[in-house]
Image: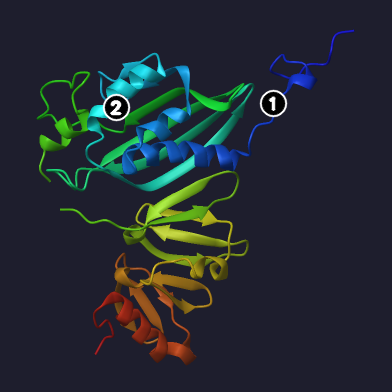
């Protein structure tokens, strides 16, 4: 009698155990951190299947093996980059896991330190005898490179250096804040882009320059790991003091025009804490 089969067509007794989706997302993100931030090509290649395919954000960046991808990437490893404003999610497919991330990247030590690349990354993971490996990786820019770039980079050339050297645009490095969102997703936003965190009935919400998104944890669980610029002004809200425009009696007005309440009995204490974190006076009058 034929053994029962799962939806991959494999007998049940041969099914592999996949890591949780959050682990797949974290593994995918770590590949990009090792590539952009740590510049550790060995760590990057450790996650790749030998016959994987790779499509990079530049026209010349297409390979059909991990070794070819390595040869294409190594020339740009002389300069570290940074990632921020990240969002990750995972889709389960028969025999595979697909991790999709969006993020911004820049090269702070380059001639154009504020040139930002808005990119997306699609990782296709397959189960191999050595565990989950990337069999396809597609990185893409959300916009074309500047028109002043009149040619494509070629294999063996530092493609990232070529792009940033062609444009000169001011650099600041900011801490990335990680948040667990409902489902299997995660969001990474730099502290300078976050305005505040609001309490909700089921957790909290992060309000940032791009809108807002829900977070599974409550404010009390998040508060201790936030940078010093974040101040609890009310049981329902934590504000980024760097994004406070003015302090009025019992409210903090943020630089987007919105406001958050300040606990009346703690107004003076809170106002002093916000001004200390902001590094400047903020109270009216």
Please indicate whether residue 93 sits to the left or right of residue 134 in the image: right
Q: Is 256 in front, or is 89? A: 89
The residue beneath circle 2 is 73
Quadrant of image for the C terminus: bottom left
Residue 203: image location, x then y, percent: 59, 62
Instruction: Looking at the image, tell me whether mark 1 or mark 2 is earlier in sequence order.
Output: 1
Asked if 193 appears above or below 87 in the picture, the reply is below
Q: Identify the secondary structure beneath mark 2.
A: helix
The residue beneath circle 1 is 16
Q: How many marks?
A: 2
Whether residue 144 appears in this view of the structure is no
Quadrant of image for the N terminus: top right
Q: Residue at x 31, y 68 (%)?
A: 243
- Locate residue 55: give its quadrant: top left
Colour mode of the rendering: rainbow
Q: Identify the secondary structure beneath mark 1.
A: loop
**Label 2: few (<14), some (14–19) or many (≥20) C-alpha neighbours in 10 Å:** many
Which numbered tag is attached to residue 252?
Answer: none
Whether residue 65 appears in this view of the structure is yes
Q: Residue at x 27, y 56 (%)?
A: 173
Asked if 136 appears above or below 186 in the picture, the reply is above
Q: Residue at x 38, y 72 (%)?
A: 228
Q: CA distance from mark 1 to mark 2?
A: 32 Å
């Amino acid at each position: 009698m034929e053994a029962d089969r799962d939806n991959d067509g494999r007998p049940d007794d041969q099914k592999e155990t996949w890591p949780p989706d959050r682990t797949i997302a974290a593994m995918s993100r770590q590949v990009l951190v090792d590539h952009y931030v740590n510049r550790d090509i060995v760590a990057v290649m450790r996650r790749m299947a030998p016959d994987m395919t790779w499509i990079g954000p530049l026209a010349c960046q297409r390979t059909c093996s991990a070794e070819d991808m390595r040869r294409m990437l190594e020339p740009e490893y002389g300069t570290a980059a940074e990632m921020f404003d990240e969002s990750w999610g995972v889709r389960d497919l028969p025999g595979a896991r697909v991790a999709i991330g969006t993020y911004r990247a820049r090269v702070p030590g380059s001639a154009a330190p504020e040139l930002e690349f808005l990119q997306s990354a699609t990782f296709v993971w397959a189960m191999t005898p050595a565990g989950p490996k990337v069999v396809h990786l597609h990185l893409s820019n959300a916009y074309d490179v500047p028109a002043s770039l009149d040619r494509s980079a070629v294999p063996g050339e530092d493609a990232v250096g070529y792009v940033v050297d062609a444009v000169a645009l001011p650099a600041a490095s900011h801490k990335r804040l990680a948040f667990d969102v409902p489902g299997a997703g995660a969001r990474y936003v730099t502290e300078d882009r976050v305005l505040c965190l609001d309490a909700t009935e089921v957790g909290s919400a992060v309000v940032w320059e791009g809108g807002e998104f829900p977070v599974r944890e409550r404010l009390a669980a998040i508060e201790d790991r936030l940078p010093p610029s974040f101040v609890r002004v009310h049981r329902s809200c934590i504000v980024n003091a760097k994004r406070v425009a003015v302090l009025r009696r019992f409210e903090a007005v943020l630089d987007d025009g919105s406001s958050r309440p300040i606990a009346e009995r703690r107004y003076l204490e809170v106002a002093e804490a916000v001004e200390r974190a902001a590094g400047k006076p903020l109270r009216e009058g």
